[in-house]
Amino acid sequence: MTRGVVVFLGPSCDRAAAREILDAEYRPPAKRGDIAEAAGAGARIIGLIDGVFFQDCAVAHREILAALRAGVRVVGASSMGALRAAELDSLGMEGVGEIYRAYREGRLVADDEVALLFDPETFVPLSEPLVNIRATLQQALACGAIGADAARGLLDAARGLYFPERTYDAVVEAAEGKVDPGDLTRFAAFAGEHAVDRKREDAILALRYIRGFAEDLL
């Protein structure tokens, strides 16, 4: 393990895959106080990928700022990390990935875009975050699997679901009567074979980004 590198990671990427990319100390999704604790214990680099939203108090801006002032390099991506990086990049936090950029540019606003339900012990996702559903709809539209009206209707259906209830099957069911049945069938098949996991993609980008400078910094 590379001493001084702490990564808060949960459902965005499995740890086995993460460890193949970056040798680090992996901790569960961050809650309030965890960034301060890691910095106080000597972390030189902190990767904030996953964090709690509604289960506990979320990571505070002030603890990230305190870590930055102490000379800790803090990188955010994918989930809570993308949110906080979009808010604090002008103050030194580093953001990575498409989700971070979407929040930074105002294309995404709500926290529930990245929220999902997951097993608290294994971190296996039990619902689908809206950012992934958006990306899958965009891909289905680009490939001609569905039309623009169907994509809008399915996105509206997904937005209308509470985040723990968002699955592709639930989205299709919620869109029944509002979207052409043929489009629903085609989208269900597309999502089953080609669903986009944007959060995982961004998590991997962040791990590679940290790996690129970790050895030189430590």
Image (cartoon, rainbow, N blue to C red):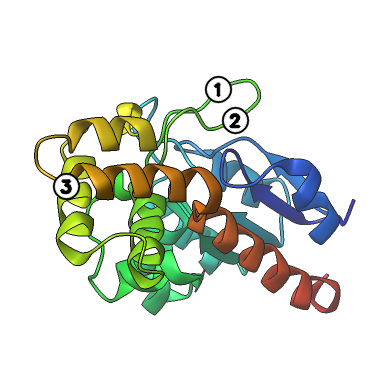
Q: Which residue is mark 2?
A: 124
Residue at image coords 74%, 42%? 15
Residue at image coords 36%, 61%? 145
Counting residues from the start of the chain, the first of labels 2 and 3 encountered is 2
Q: Which residue is mark 3?
A: 180
| Marks 1/2: CA–CA distance | 5 Å
x%, y% of residue 165?
31, 27
Q: Secondary structure at mark 1?
A: loop
User: Residue type at mark 1?
Assistant: Asp
Residue projecting furthest to the left? 178
Q: Of the residues tagged 2 and 3, which is closer to the observer? A: 3
Q: How many marks?
A: 3
| Marks 2/3: CA–CA distance | 32 Å
Q: Is residue 120 left or right of residue 105?
A: right
Q: Secondary structure at mark 2?
A: loop
Residue at image coords 51%, 61%? 77
Quadrant housing residue 123: top right
Q: Is residue 167 something one can see in this rendering?
A: no
Counting residues from the start of the chain, the first of labels 3 and 1 encountered is 1
Disc 1 crowd rating (10 Å Cα; few below 14, some 14-19, many 20+) is few
Q: Which residue is mark 1?
A: 119
User: Residue type at mark 2?
Assistant: Val
Q: Is residue 112 above or below residue 134?
A: above
Residue projecting furthest to the right? 1
Q: Is residue 77 above or below residue 166?
A: below
User: Residue type at mark 3?
Assistant: Asp
Give the camera-side residue of 199 and 48.
199
